[in-house]
Amino acid sequence: MPLGNTIKTIATFGNTSYDFIAGGTGSGDVNEAYTISLEQGLTNAGFKVQDDLKQLYRTYINKEKIKHPKKSFFLEFMNPTPRPEELTLAPELFATMAAASDIALITIGKNAGEGADRKVANDFDLADVEKTLISQVSKAFHLAGKKVVLVLNVGGVVEVASWKNDVDTILLSWQPGMEAGNAVADIVSGKVNPSGKLATTFPVQYADVASAKTFPGKEFPEQATTGMMGMKVMPAEVTYEDGIYVGYRYYNTFNIQPAYEFGYGLSYTNFAFSNLKLSSPSFKRKITVTVDITNTGKTAGKEVAQLYLAAPSIKMDKPLEELKGFAKTNLLQPGQKQTVSFVLTPDALASFDTNSTSWIADAGKYTVKIGSSSIQIKHMATFQLPTALVVEKCNKVLAPQVIIDELKN
């Protein structure tokens, strides 16, 4: 639930609470006129942020920025300024803040993008100092009977499985632009009911990613050249063997349990799915799918209905299911219902057949799955495709120069 009127004073931990990351590096960012910090956003929303904590972080961040004066765009691109290491706080401070505050809010920030590739250590996997911060804050505040909210201000997936149960709520803000702090404050205060869903899977560990076995491949230093702005250009090669099993298709098909699945997302209310209908039991030119969504909670909100399709695997390897459509409802009041519809065309049924360089829909039984995520499937229905369809014939171009041992189910 949102913080509500009972929460007045917030202990705000984490460097990024005071230095929010609006966008990524290089072309992953824009020249924002300003960036509202989370601390400022909370203040704007009427909350009191603990002053002592605020001064500690502001002093530390300012000192770190002095060590790294602002560089030109080109120098920053070639050698991005590292973000300050997470501030280490005195152990006794956590109990003091827990006694003097109504709730704790921790922000963890990670930045990457053009010119600053991601890494596993201290990036995908949080740094030890960040994990320690989460643990110490959570223990102190839970001991005082108070809750902990964690905000992830990140540009990509991070490991959460080892610490997610230490906190009460995780808000994934991504890198939300110049109004970042105000936007997050609107969510935690309840002014806005969140309705976003994950467009990627959060794995339990990096090794669970299908391409982890072959990425990042190999480099050829003997072929290095000097490129733009004097940067060293190192030829490299990586062979992706995951084939069609990218993202949720891999996790679901091979039963790899994620930390948070594709399509996952909560709000301050609940929804019920009912009355799934198909316009026909047999596919001809199209099929219309409808489903009713009802707000069964006590707060107005929006839900995202997701349609996944399981296709017969006769001549081609197929994943367990594939997303074929999604639709967000209007703002539904408690008890209000809305009917959402999807239209499946031949394109939605087809898979690419490498041997014939064609998009083909195999004849057989297709299963429509409707749910709130790729795992939370609420209802299913089936239809038949009487005869196979060649949806599109393609030209054979850009064929791999080596044999790729693609993953098969």
Image (tube, helix red, strand yellow):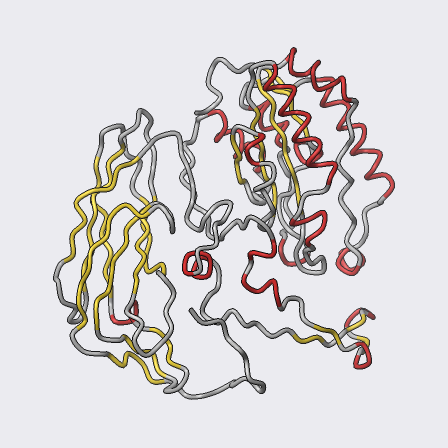
Residue 97 sits in quarter: top right
Please give the name of the residue rendered at 44% of the width and 88% of the height, measured from the top-left corner: 396
Residue 67 in picture, x, y percent from top left: 87, 41
Foreground: 35 or 82? 82
As drawn, 299 above or below 351: above
- Total label count? 0
Horizontal side of 209 relative to 124 (left or right) equals left
Residue 391 in picture, x, y percent from top left: 28, 78
Residue 223 in picture, x, y percent from top left: 79, 81
Please give the name of the residue rendered at 72% of the width and 23% of the height, measured from the top-left corner: 54
- Quarter placement of the C terminus: bottom left
Please give the name of the residue rendered at 65% of the width and 15% of the height, measured from the top-left corner: 98
Residue 34 sits in quarter: top right
Residue 368 sits in quarter: bottom left
Residue at the extreme right: 67
Horizontal side of 248 relative to 315 (left or right) equals right
Foreground: 148 or 48? 148
Foreground: 47 or 251? 251
As drawn, 378 above or below 299: below
- Quarter placement of the N terminus: top left
Horizontal side of 191 relative to 157 (left or right) equals left
As drawn, 337 above or below 146: below
Residue 269 in picture, x, y percent from top left: 35, 30
